[in-house]
Image: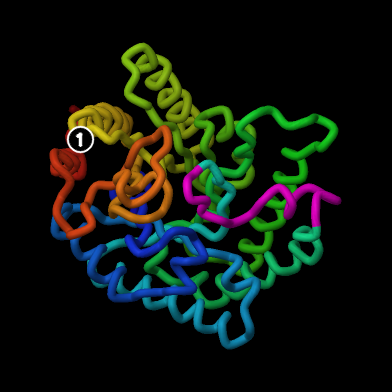
Amino acid sequence: MDIQDIRGFNYQPGYAYAGADIWRRFDPDAFRRELGWGKRHFPRMNGVRIWLAWEVFGQGSDQQREQFLDNVETVLAIADGYGLAVMPVLFNRWHAGAPDWGGVYLDHLLPGAGWAGFGFRNRCKEYVTAVMERFGQDERVFAWDLCNEPFSYGREPDPRWELAGHEEAWLEALYADCKEHAPQAPVSVGLFNGAAHLKRYEHLSDILNFHYYWQGNAETKESFLRELDECVALRERTGKPLISTEACWGSLDDTRRVEIIEFHLGELNRRRIGWLVYALQHSCIADLHWPRYGRVTNPGTLHCVEPDGALREGHGVINRFLEGATE
Protein backbone atom coordinates (compact mmCIF):
# COMPACT_ATOMS: atom_id res chain seq x y z
CA MET A 1 0.00 0.00 0.00
CA ASP A 2 1.27 3.48 -0.88
CA ILE A 3 2.12 5.25 2.39
CA GLN A 4 0.50 8.44 1.09
CA ASP A 5 -2.79 6.58 0.65
CA ILE A 6 -2.92 5.52 4.32
CA ARG A 7 -5.85 7.18 6.09
CA GLY A 8 -6.94 6.03 9.48
CA PHE A 9 -6.41 6.43 13.20
CA ASN A 10 -4.20 5.89 16.19
CA TYR A 11 -5.77 3.44 18.61
CA GLN A 12 -5.42 3.25 22.38
CA PRO A 13 -7.81 0.71 23.97
CA GLY A 14 -10.49 2.15 26.21
CA TYR A 15 -9.58 0.10 29.29
CA ALA A 16 -5.97 1.30 29.56
CA TYR A 17 -4.43 4.12 31.58
CA ALA A 18 -0.84 3.72 30.33
CA GLY A 19 1.18 1.84 27.75
CA ALA A 20 2.25 -1.01 30.00
CA ASP A 21 -1.36 -1.32 31.13
CA ILE A 22 -2.43 -2.10 27.54
CA TRP A 23 -0.22 -5.17 27.39
CA ARG A 24 -0.11 -6.35 31.02
CA ARG A 25 -3.92 -6.41 31.14
CA PHE A 26 -4.21 -7.29 27.47
CA ASP A 27 -7.86 -7.62 26.43
CA PRO A 28 -8.25 -8.93 22.88
CA ASP A 29 -12.03 -8.59 23.09
CA ALA A 30 -11.64 -4.83 23.63
CA PHE A 31 -9.38 -4.56 20.58
CA ARG A 32 -11.84 -6.58 18.51
CA ARG A 33 -14.86 -4.61 19.72
CA GLU A 34 -13.38 -1.11 19.51
CA LEU A 35 -11.62 -1.53 16.18
CA GLY A 36 -14.90 -2.99 14.95
CA TRP A 37 -16.73 0.14 16.08
CA GLY A 38 -14.15 2.20 14.23
CA LYS A 39 -14.58 0.25 11.01
CA ARG A 40 -18.37 0.51 11.29
CA HIS A 41 -18.28 4.28 11.70
CA PHE A 42 -15.42 4.82 9.24
CA PRO A 43 -15.67 2.08 6.59
CA ARG A 44 -12.90 3.53 4.42
CA MET A 45 -10.25 3.67 7.14
CA ASN A 46 -7.35 1.50 6.01
CA GLY A 47 -4.61 2.02 8.59
CA VAL A 48 -4.10 2.01 12.34
CA ARG A 49 -1.16 2.98 14.54
CA ILE A 50 -0.81 0.61 17.52
CA TRP A 51 1.51 1.44 20.41
CA LEU A 52 3.61 -1.35 21.91
CA ALA A 53 5.25 -1.09 25.37
CA TRP A 54 8.93 -2.04 25.44
CA GLU A 55 9.01 -2.24 29.24
CA VAL A 56 6.54 -5.15 29.31
CA PHE A 57 8.96 -7.15 27.19
CA GLY A 58 12.13 -5.74 28.78
CA GLN A 59 11.02 -6.51 32.35
CA GLY A 60 9.38 -9.82 31.58
CA SER A 61 10.34 -13.44 32.11
CA ASP A 62 10.94 -15.62 29.05
CA GLN A 63 7.34 -16.79 29.28
CA GLN A 64 6.01 -13.22 29.65
CA ARG A 65 8.07 -12.06 26.69
CA GLU A 66 6.66 -14.79 24.51
CA GLN A 67 3.15 -13.93 25.67
CA PHE A 68 3.72 -10.29 24.76
CA LEU A 69 4.74 -11.26 21.24
CA ASP A 70 1.75 -13.59 20.98
CA ASN A 71 -0.50 -10.69 22.01
CA VAL A 72 0.99 -8.50 19.28
CA GLU A 73 0.23 -11.30 16.82
CA THR A 74 -3.37 -11.32 18.05
CA VAL A 75 -3.68 -7.57 17.45
CA LEU A 76 -2.25 -7.84 13.94
CA ALA A 77 -4.77 -10.58 13.17
CA ILE A 78 -7.68 -8.51 14.53
CA ALA A 79 -6.63 -5.46 12.53
CA ASP A 80 -6.16 -7.53 9.39
CA GLY A 81 -9.64 -8.94 9.85
CA TYR A 82 -10.98 -5.38 9.51
CA GLY A 83 -8.79 -4.61 6.49
CA LEU A 84 -6.43 -2.38 8.49
CA ALA A 85 -2.72 -2.17 7.82
CA VAL A 86 -0.74 -1.56 11.02
CA MET A 87 2.05 0.78 12.09
CA PRO A 88 3.45 -0.54 15.39
CA VAL A 89 5.20 1.99 17.66
CA LEU A 90 8.14 0.36 19.45
CA PHE A 91 9.11 3.07 21.98
CA ASN A 92 7.54 6.24 23.38
CA ARG A 93 9.12 9.53 24.50
CA TRP A 94 5.93 11.62 24.97
CA HIS A 95 5.36 12.31 28.66
CA ALA A 96 3.11 15.39 28.69
CA GLY A 97 -0.13 13.58 29.37
CA ALA A 98 -2.23 12.90 32.44
CA PRO A 99 -1.81 10.10 33.26
CA ASP A 100 1.67 9.54 31.90
CA TRP A 101 1.81 6.95 29.12
CA GLY A 102 5.18 5.49 30.11
CA GLY A 103 8.06 4.45 27.86
CA VAL A 104 11.57 5.88 27.78
CA TYR A 105 12.73 8.64 30.16
CA LEU A 106 15.74 10.93 30.39
CA ASP A 107 17.16 8.60 33.05
CA HIS A 108 17.44 5.97 30.33
CA LEU A 109 19.23 8.25 27.88
CA LEU A 110 21.44 10.64 29.85
CA PRO A 111 24.60 8.95 31.18
CA GLY A 112 24.77 9.18 34.95
CA ALA A 113 21.19 10.43 35.33
CA GLY A 114 19.98 7.38 37.24
CA TRP A 115 19.96 3.63 37.60
CA ALA A 116 17.56 3.12 34.67
CA GLY A 117 20.36 3.58 32.14
CA PHE A 118 22.32 0.53 33.25
CA GLY A 119 21.75 -2.25 30.73
CA PHE A 120 19.17 -0.17 28.84
CA ARG A 121 20.89 -0.43 25.47
CA ASN A 122 21.10 -4.23 25.70
CA ARG A 123 17.42 -4.51 26.69
CA CYS A 124 16.47 -2.33 23.72
CA LYS A 125 18.41 -4.54 21.34
CA GLU A 126 16.84 -7.71 22.76
CA TYR A 127 13.39 -6.22 22.35
CA VAL A 128 13.92 -4.92 18.81
CA THR A 129 15.53 -8.20 17.77
CA ALA A 130 12.62 -10.26 19.13
CA VAL A 131 10.00 -8.07 17.46
CA MET A 132 11.81 -8.01 14.11
CA GLU A 133 12.49 -11.74 14.11
CA ARG A 134 8.79 -12.40 14.72
CA PHE A 135 7.20 -9.65 12.61
CA GLY A 136 9.85 -8.09 10.38
CA GLN A 137 8.52 -9.86 7.27
CA ASP A 138 4.87 -9.53 8.25
CA GLU A 139 2.90 -8.02 5.37
CA ARG A 140 0.22 -6.76 7.76
CA VAL A 141 2.68 -4.07 8.89
CA PHE A 142 2.79 -1.07 6.52
CA ALA A 143 5.56 0.76 8.42
CA TRP A 144 7.44 0.73 11.73
CA ASP A 145 7.59 3.70 14.09
CA LEU A 146 10.75 3.31 16.16
CA CYS A 147 9.80 5.97 18.66
CA ASN A 148 6.92 8.34 19.27
CA GLU A 149 8.01 11.98 19.66
CA PRO A 150 11.65 11.84 20.71
CA PHE A 151 13.40 15.13 21.57
CA SER A 152 10.29 16.13 23.56
CA TYR A 153 11.95 18.31 26.19
CA GLY A 154 9.28 20.93 26.84
CA ARG A 155 12.02 23.53 27.33
CA GLU A 156 15.57 23.83 26.07
CA PRO A 157 17.75 21.44 28.11
CA ASP A 158 21.07 22.47 29.63
CA PRO A 159 23.54 22.28 26.71
CA ARG A 160 26.11 20.63 28.98
CA TRP A 161 23.96 17.52 29.02
CA GLU A 162 24.25 17.10 25.22
CA LEU A 163 20.86 15.44 25.55
CA ALA A 164 19.80 15.59 21.90
CA GLY A 165 23.07 13.95 20.91
CA HIS A 166 22.53 11.06 23.31
CA GLU A 167 18.96 10.62 22.11
CA GLU A 168 20.00 10.72 18.46
CA ALA A 169 22.70 8.10 19.08
CA TRP A 170 20.13 5.86 20.76
CA LEU A 171 17.75 6.20 17.79
CA GLU A 172 20.55 5.55 15.32
CA ALA A 173 21.33 2.33 17.17
CA LEU A 174 17.65 1.30 17.11
CA TYR A 175 17.42 2.01 13.40
CA ALA A 176 20.53 -0.12 12.77
CA ASP A 177 19.12 -2.91 14.96
CA CYS A 178 15.94 -2.98 12.85
CA LYS A 179 17.78 -2.87 9.57
CA GLU A 180 19.93 -5.86 10.56
CA HIS A 181 16.77 -7.93 10.05
CA ALA A 182 15.89 -6.42 6.65
CA PRO A 183 12.23 -5.71 7.51
CA GLN A 184 9.89 -5.63 4.52
CA ALA A 185 8.16 -2.45 5.75
CA PRO A 186 9.88 0.95 6.00
CA VAL A 187 11.31 2.06 9.35
CA SER A 188 10.73 5.59 10.66
CA VAL A 189 10.60 7.85 13.71
CA GLY A 190 7.43 9.77 14.68
CA LEU A 191 8.83 13.30 14.95
CA PHE A 192 6.66 15.99 16.54
CA ASN A 193 8.28 19.22 15.36
CA GLY A 194 7.27 19.13 11.71
CA ALA A 195 9.73 20.10 9.00
CA ALA A 196 12.45 21.19 11.43
CA HIS A 197 12.77 17.69 12.88
CA LEU A 198 12.24 15.96 9.54
CA LYS A 199 15.19 17.87 8.07
CA ARG A 200 17.44 17.35 11.07
CA TYR A 201 16.73 13.64 11.55
CA GLU A 202 15.81 12.49 8.07
CA HIS A 203 18.57 9.83 8.22
CA LEU A 204 16.54 7.96 10.85
CA SER A 205 13.55 7.32 8.60
CA ASP A 206 12.81 5.52 5.35
CA ILE A 207 9.59 7.54 5.18
CA LEU A 208 8.87 11.05 6.47
CA ASN A 209 6.76 10.50 9.59
CA PHE A 210 5.67 13.69 11.37
CA HIS A 211 3.19 15.24 13.80
CA TYR A 212 2.22 18.88 13.53
CA TYR A 213 -1.04 19.95 15.12
CA TRP A 214 -3.08 23.01 14.23
CA GLN A 215 -4.60 23.96 17.57
CA GLY A 216 -7.57 25.86 16.19
CA ASN A 217 -6.24 29.42 16.34
CA ALA A 218 -7.18 31.47 13.27
CA GLU A 219 -3.97 33.51 13.51
CA THR A 220 -1.81 30.37 13.17
CA LYS A 221 -3.44 28.99 10.02
CA GLU A 222 -0.92 30.49 7.63
CA SER A 223 2.07 29.27 9.61
CA PHE A 224 0.52 25.80 9.76
CA LEU A 225 0.09 25.75 5.97
CA ARG A 226 3.67 26.91 5.46
CA GLU A 227 4.80 24.07 7.70
CA LEU A 228 2.92 21.51 5.63
CA ASP A 229 4.39 22.97 2.44
CA GLU A 230 7.91 22.64 3.89
CA CYS A 231 7.21 18.99 4.63
CA VAL A 232 5.99 18.47 1.06
CA ALA A 233 9.11 20.18 -0.30
CA LEU A 234 11.23 17.74 1.70
CA ARG A 235 9.22 14.87 0.23
CA GLU A 236 9.97 16.18 -3.26
CA ARG A 237 13.67 16.60 -2.48
CA THR A 238 14.19 13.20 -0.86
CA GLY A 239 11.68 11.08 -2.78
CA LYS A 240 10.48 9.64 0.53
CA PRO A 241 6.72 9.18 1.17
CA LEU A 242 5.16 11.60 3.65
CA ILE A 243 2.65 10.73 6.39
CA SER A 244 1.30 12.61 9.39
CA THR A 245 0.91 9.83 11.93
CA GLU A 246 -0.89 12.10 14.39
CA ALA A 247 -3.44 14.68 13.23
CA CYS A 248 -6.36 16.74 14.56
CA TRP A 249 -5.95 18.58 17.87
CA GLY A 250 -8.62 18.07 20.50
CA SER A 251 -11.31 20.04 22.27
CA LEU A 252 -14.02 19.44 24.84
CA ASP A 253 -16.37 21.24 22.45
CA ASP A 254 -17.57 18.94 19.68
CA THR A 255 -18.22 21.76 17.22
CA ARG A 256 -14.75 23.17 17.76
CA ARG A 257 -13.15 19.76 17.30
CA VAL A 258 -15.01 19.23 14.03
CA GLU A 259 -13.76 22.59 12.73
CA ILE A 260 -10.20 21.52 13.54
CA ILE A 261 -10.69 18.16 11.80
CA GLU A 262 -12.12 19.74 8.65
CA PHE A 263 -9.29 22.21 8.25
CA HIS A 264 -6.47 19.82 9.15
CA LEU A 265 -7.53 16.81 7.08
CA GLY A 266 -8.55 18.94 4.13
CA GLU A 267 -5.09 20.45 3.93
CA LEU A 268 -3.39 17.07 4.30
CA ASN A 269 -5.52 15.64 1.48
CA ARG A 270 -4.82 18.67 -0.68
CA ARG A 271 -1.10 17.87 -0.46
CA ARG A 272 -1.52 14.08 -0.73
CA ILE A 273 -0.09 13.49 2.70
CA GLY A 274 -1.12 10.23 4.38
CA TRP A 275 -2.67 10.65 7.82
CA LEU A 276 -3.73 8.95 11.03
CA VAL A 277 -6.07 10.89 13.30
CA TYR A 278 -5.23 10.89 17.00
CA ALA A 279 -7.23 8.97 18.11
CA LEU A 280 -10.05 6.54 17.45
CA GLN A 281 -11.43 5.45 20.80
CA HIS A 282 -12.39 7.14 24.06
CA SER A 283 -9.79 5.85 26.52
CA CYS A 284 -8.40 6.35 30.02
CA ILE A 285 -5.12 7.18 28.23
CA ALA A 286 -4.17 10.86 28.45
CA ASP A 287 -6.06 13.34 26.23
CA LEU A 288 -8.63 10.77 25.12
CA HIS A 289 -11.41 11.09 27.68
CA TRP A 290 -14.12 13.32 29.07
CA PRO A 291 -13.40 15.02 32.43
CA ARG A 292 -15.50 12.58 34.45
CA TYR A 293 -13.07 9.80 33.48
CA GLY A 294 -9.92 11.56 34.70
CA ARG A 295 -7.85 14.70 34.57
CA VAL A 296 -8.04 16.69 31.34
CA THR A 297 -5.29 19.06 30.22
CA ASN A 298 -4.76 21.56 27.40
CA PRO A 299 -5.73 19.39 24.39
CA GLY A 300 -9.14 18.60 25.84
CA THR A 301 -10.07 15.23 24.37
CA LEU A 302 -9.11 13.89 20.95
CA HIS A 303 -11.26 10.76 20.79
CA CYS A 304 -13.75 10.08 17.99
CA VAL A 305 -15.77 7.12 19.31
CA GLU A 306 -17.53 7.22 22.67
CA PRO A 307 -17.16 4.63 25.48
CA ASP A 308 -20.39 2.88 24.42
CA GLY A 309 -19.37 2.68 20.77
CA ALA A 310 -21.45 5.63 19.58
CA LEU A 311 -19.87 8.10 17.20
CA ARG A 312 -18.90 11.37 18.87
CA GLU A 313 -21.16 14.17 17.71
CA GLY A 314 -20.17 15.61 14.33
CA HIS A 315 -17.20 13.29 13.86
CA GLY A 316 -18.80 11.47 10.94
CA VAL A 317 -17.30 14.34 8.90
CA ILE A 318 -14.06 12.36 8.88
CA ASN A 319 -15.65 10.07 6.29
CA ARG A 320 -15.54 12.88 3.72
CA PHE A 321 -11.79 13.04 4.08
CA LEU A 322 -11.36 9.27 4.08
CA GLU A 323 -12.98 9.51 0.64
CA GLY A 324 -10.46 12.14 -0.46
CA ALA A 325 -12.22 15.47 0.13
CA THR A 326 -10.04 18.55 0.43
CA GLU A 327 -12.57 20.80 2.18
Position in image of residue 148 (x %, y %): 53, 49
Quadrant for the N terminus in the image:
bottom left
Residue at left offset 36%, top offset 38%? 247
Residue 93 in view:
yes
Instruction: Identify the secondary structure beneath mark 1.
Output: helix
Query: Residue 168's quadrant in the figure?
Result: top right
Q: Nearer the viewer, residue 244 or 315?
A: 315
Query: Residue 259's quadrant in the figure?
Result: top left
Q: Is residue 107 magenta?
A: yes
Quadrant for the C terminus in the image:
top left
216 sits left or right of 101 in the view: left
Residue at left offset 49%, top offset 41%? 208
Position in image of residue 231 (x %, y %): 46, 29
Residue at left offset 42%, top offset 48%? 286
93 sits left or right of 315 in the view: right
Residue at left offset 32%, top offset 15%? 218
Position in image of residue 321 (x %, y %): 20, 39
46 sits left or right of 56 in the view: left
**Rendered view: 266 above or below 41:** above
Q: Nearer the viewer, residue 120 or 238?
A: 120
Which color mode does the image show?
A: rainbow
**Rendered view: 270 above or below 317:** above
Q: Is residue 106 magenta?
A: yes
Residue 323 in view:
no
Seen as rendered, the residue at the extreme bottom is 63
Q: Nearer the viewer, residue 28 or 189?
A: 28
- The residue singled out by tag 1 in the image is 254
Give the magenta-colored segment's residue range. 97-114
Secondary structure mostly seen in magenta is loop
Amino acid type, residue under disc 1 in the picture: Asp
